[in-house]
Amino acid sequence: TAQQVTLRLHVFIPPPANPYKTFLKPWAERIAKASNGKLKIQIYPSMQLGGKPPQLLDQVKDGVVDIVWTLPGYTAGRFPKLEVFELPFVHKDPLSTTLALQDFQAKHLQQEFKDYKVLLLHAHAGSMFMTKRKAITKLSDLKGVKIRTATRAGGWYLKSLGAVPIGAPLPKIPQMISKGVIEGAMLPYEIAPAIKMQELVSNFTILSGDQPRMNTSTFSFLMNKASYNKLPADLRKVIDDNSGRNIAKWAGQNWADIEIPARKVMASKKKNKFHIMPPAEVAKMKVAAKPAIDRWLNQMKKKGIDGQALLDDARAMIAKYR
């Protein structure tokens, strides 16, 4: 009988987190089933194999681990073209953005991800303001407020709105809120229970209109190229059958679905209040966000990349699947 192959998947989130329970674990189970038990994915949560979340990209590239699931945004500027999806008011919902990312990757990201076997690029449902004391119900409420963001583009956006962006990986948020380093964070609902945001903050703000979330974070599910290439052909096929376009719809829908129970967890505490920013204030935010988009366009220009073409493509691809 063929020898069983075990691949090590390293992630920064803990097992109770929604992405672990609803995507990573089921994906590992799919691989085991499709390979008749020949290929096993061993998941190591909460950075159990050492290092910090921003090091995951190098761990998988260098073969320290076989697979990682992480935010490219933790290593600012490493995948500049991918950042277009994280710019304010580009993203609409996780399904259309995740499907659009497959088209965008095929057309624009081959070079950026040449060092990896890409299993999937996807997005979460999108960020909202989760704040401790101050409810964010209008643009002026953000002035001087320290808010955690996961990405460089998110930081530019917060700055353009008058807030003070603080970059940090997810596991740092509870301590930073408790110590008063930040007043809140930009997050989707789904991940909030994993760090007990229902206890840490009291205000949750989404936007009115067809874009209830301001922006999103992109996620990369990546495999070491050598780990992939040394698999026998039948097991490579199992990986291919469970990556890219073959799982994009599942992942996009999953990140939409897991918002619902997570919002209920946030609402389980009586102190928590939910706000919808009115249309006039959303319009102001869209105007205020322009410098963040311009800043990214200028970064692209310096690299000799036509950022506007990428932005137009990202928007058109999202519209196609919306």
Image (cartoon, rainbow, N blue to C red):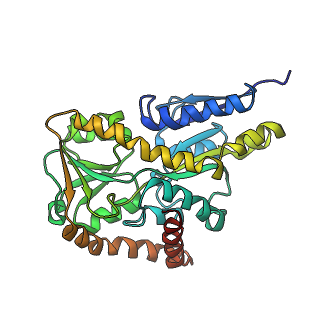
Q: Residue 128: image x %, image y %?
A: 30, 53
Q: Residue at x 60, y 59 (%)?
A: 102
Question: Residue 240's quadrant in the figure?
Answer: top right
Pick whichever, 219 or 23, lies toward us.
23
> Where 25 falls versus 107 (above or below)?
above
Q: Is residue 111 left or right of residue 163?
A: right
Q: Residue furthest top?
A: 1
Is residue 62 found left or right of 10 in the rendered image? right
Q: Is residue 302 left or right of residue 41?
A: left
Q: Where's the N terminus, which quadrant? A: top right
Which residue shows up at 35% across the image and 41% down it? 260
Apparent side of residue 181 relative to residue 212 in the rendered image (left or right): left
Name which residue lies at 55% across and 31% down. 25
Front residue of 116/270: it is: 270
Q: Between residues 165 and 258, which one lies in front from this camera angle?
A: 258
**Can you give x and y, in whole percent of width and height, for residue 226 in the image?**
75, 43
Expressed as whole percent of the image width and height from the top left, the position of residue 273 reads 16, 44
